[in-house]
Amino acid sequence: MIIKPKDRLIFALDVPSLKEVKKWVRLLKGYVGVFKVGKELFTACGPKVIDIIHQSGGKVFLDLKFHDIPNTAAKAGAVAARLGVKMFNVHTLGGLDMMEAVREAVDKTCKRGRRPIILGVTILTSMNEKAMKEVGIQGPVKKRVLYLAGLAKKAGFDGVVASPLEAKDIKKRFGKDFIIVTPGIRMPDSKPDDQNRTMTPKQAIAAGADYIVVGRPIREAKDPVEAANKILEEMR
Ligand code: C5P
């Protein structure tokens, strides 16, 4: 099945108000397959934002990176499933028991085959080996990411959020159906901001990413539609 570049592009709605959400969704609906609702927006506006995106025909990636005791994370996952989002994520560092509890709770909540895509966040794309060492995680980033992706697979998750630099190895080890969502996307001429492990859209797709998450390179562009279009072109 050929997936259109638009369906692979996830726009990070890192804004604090419903007014801005409406503006961005209206502007980018024709260029973006999924809108990502993260911590800033969800904390500011709550689940209403998801309804607004759904009402305007958009799909939602709920990026709240659940990381808690199994019971709490599982209940949060079930609520996310009931909100009808296309995908949501859970932090793999919360452990295998937590991930399994989430997957079981979501399976119980949803009718067969109609559950959202559950993704495990491996190592944040803003982190490098030095930052990992600071929090007591030793060794090369890629090795850790592959290990955590394995745990997500074992828990029955559909895929992972990882940097494009690890995408190729994840696909090789866990198969082509194991979904990879990659933030840390930058055009050759854009600044990295706080991201440490980046690639261009074209490189990320070539490495095996199924979806790419782009925020600031579109949001902060002089002409965001043109920036989104350039990204779609790059992916073709
Ligand atoms: O602006 P930028 O393109 O860097 O935005 C990347 C988005 O992806 C942000 O919303 C960030 O929260 C999210 N993200 C990330 N790294 C992860 C998971 C999500 O950058 N591992």
Image (cartoon, rainbow, N blue to C red):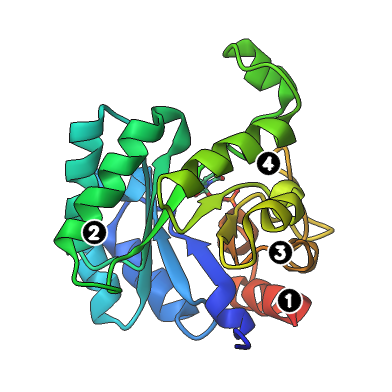
Q: Which residue is mark 1?
A: 235
Residue type pointed to by label 1:
Met
Mark whose residue sits in front, 2 or 4: 2
Query: Which of disc 4 and disc 2 is earlier in sequence?
Result: 2
Query: Which of disc 3 and disc 1 is earlier in sequence?
Result: 3
Are the residues flagged by discs 4 and 3 in contact, CB closer than 8 Å? no
Q: Which numbered dot is residue 208?
A: 3
Measure the C-alpha gap from mark 4 to mark 3.
24 Å
Report x, y in % for residue 177: 57, 67
Q: Which residue is mark 2?
A: 107
Residue 7 is left or right of residue 163, and the answer is left
Mark whose residue sits in front, 2 or 1: 2
Are the residues flagged by discs 4 and 1 in contact, CB closer than 8 Å? no
Measure the C-alpha gap from mark 1 to mark 3.
12 Å
Mark whose residue sits in front, 4 or 3: 3
Q: Quadrant of the N terminus?
A: bottom right
Residue type pointed to by label 2:
Asp
Report x, y in % for residue 25: 40, 74
Q: Secondary structure at mark 1?
A: helix
Mark whose residue sits in front, 1 or 3: 3
Q: Does any portion of residue 126 appear in the rendered image?
A: no
Residue positioned 33% across, 50% down in the render? 41
Measure the C-alpha gap from mark 4 to mark 1.
22 Å
Are the residues flagged by discs 2 and 1 in contact, CB closer than 8 Å? no
* Label 4, residues with CA under 10 Å away: few <14, some 14-19, many ≥20: few
* Label 1, residues with CA under 10 Å away: few <14, some 14-19, many ≥20: many
Q: Which numbered dot is residue 193?
A: 4
Q: Which numbered dot is residue 11?
A: none
Q: Does any portion of residue 201 appear in the rendered image?
A: yes
Q: Secondary structure at mark 3?
A: loop
